[in-house]
Amino acid sequence: MEVVIASTNKGKISEIRKILSGLEIEILSLDDFSQIPTIIEDGCTFEENAVKKATAISKLTGKVTLADDSGLEVDCLNGAPGITSARFGGDGLNDAERNQKLLELLKEVSDGERKARFKCVLAIACPDGKINTVCGECQGLISLEVRGNQGFGYDPIFIPDGYSKTFGELGGEIKDKISHRARALFRAREVLLEIIQKVKQK
Amino acid sequence: MEVVIASTNKGKISEIRKILSGLEIEILSLDDFSQIPTIIEDGCTFEENAVKKATAISKLTGKVTLADDSGLEVDCLNGAPGITSARFGGDGLNDAERNQKLLELLKEVSDGERKARFKCVLAIACPDGKINTVCGECQGLISLEVRGNQGFGYDPIFIPDGYSKTFGELGGEIKDKISHRARALFRAREVLLEIIQKVKQK
C-alpha cells in the first residue's frame, strides 16, 4: 500500500519515514507528484489544518494520505506561536532567525516561567473519504539560549521535561522516542495497520 | 515564644529563619545552648530522624523544637543517597567533593535518566510531648556538570522541574519558594501558628 506524506518539510518527512519504518507501506511525499497545488492552512486549530491537507491530497492522489500539523505553544505568550509556528515572526525567516526572535521576545521572562509544549496532530485520509486523527504532545520549556544544531525548527531552544539538554543537543535517537510527532506517529502506526489489514482483506 | 532549630547546619538554619520570619517567635539554634549532646540519626526514614531529634532537643531544652531531616533521592541510584545524603561518599567530604562524587557515579547515565527529588521532613516537638510532622518535596534532575555556587549541599547539581538552571544558579529568592524545605516550612508555619495561639490562650 502506498501512503503519501502531505508535506514538503524535509525534517518532518525524515522523522515520519523513520518512525513508520517496518510497516508494509511505500512512503511517497509531495515531491513524487507533479502539479499538486499548495493547500492553504487557514484552519483555527492544528486538527483543522491537518484534516484539510490530508483530505485534499488524498482526493488529488487517490491514495491514503498522512498530513501533519504541529507547532509550539509558549505559556507566557498565551499559547503563541501555536498554529502559526512555521511562519512566526515573518515568512522570510529561517529557523535560526525565528529562534532568535522567540528568545528575544522572552528576554525578560525568568527561568521557571518559560513553560512550553510541542503539539502535533496527524490526519490520515483514505480515498473512500474516511478520516482519522491522532495527536501527540511533548511538555518542556524554552531554553535561555540556542543550544545544539540537530533537528529543525524550534528544536535548539526547546528542553523537554526530564532532560537538561535541548532537542537540538539531544538529537534524533531521543527525539524519535519522546517528541510530539513521535507520540502521534506511534498512534498513527496503529491506524495504518488497521487500514493495511482492511486493504488486504478486500 | 521561643523555638529551637535542632540543627548546626548554617545553610539550613538560614533558610528556616528566612521562611519563618514574621511569626511571633524568637528563633534559637543549638549554638545558643551549651552541653547539648549530638543526637545520633540512626532512623530508617527522614521522618524517624526528624522526630527523634525534635523530641530529644525539646526534652533537653524545655522549649518548642523544630528539627529537619532532608536529602536527595536519585532514581537511577534506587533512591540513594536518601537519608545518608549529608555523609554520602564519606564523612570527611565537603559539599563540592560530594557533588563531584555523585556526578562521577552518574557519568554513564544519560540526560533524561537523571530524575531525582529533594525531600524534607520537619518535626515540631512541644515540651508537653506533643509532636507534629510535615513534609515537602521538590522534583527535578541531576545536572550533567556543577553549575552555580549559591545555596549549599547538592544545590549546584540539582535542576528543579520547570527550570533550566540549578539551585546553585537560581539562588535563594527562587529556592525559598519552591524547594523541599520551603514547602515543608510553609506547612510548619501553620503548625507553629496553632501552637502560638494555644500558648497565648493559657
Image (cartoon, coloured by chain):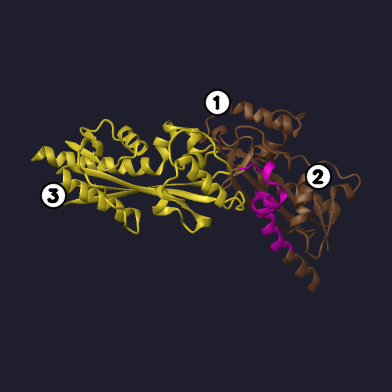
Chain colours: A yellow, B brown
User: Rounded to the nearest whole Å, what is the CA distance between mark 2 and mark 1?
Assistant: 34 Å
Residue drawn where x is 49% and y is 43% of the image: A97
Q: Are marks 3 and 1 on the same chain?
A: no
Which is the main secondary structure of the residues drawn in magenta?
Answer: helix
Q: Is residue B191 magenta?
A: yes
Q: Nearer the viewer, mark 2 or mark 1?
A: 1
Circle 1: residue type: Glu
Q: Position of residue A92 (x, y in %)?
A: 42, 46
Q: Is residue B146 visible?
A: yes
Q: Give the labeled residue for mark 1.
A: B108
Return the residue at label 2. Answer: B10
Q: Residue under mark 2: which chain is it in?
A: B
Q: Chain of mark 1?
A: B
Where is residue A24? Give x, y as percent: 20, 32
Q: Secondary structure at mark 1?
A: loop
Which subunit holds the residue at mark 3? A
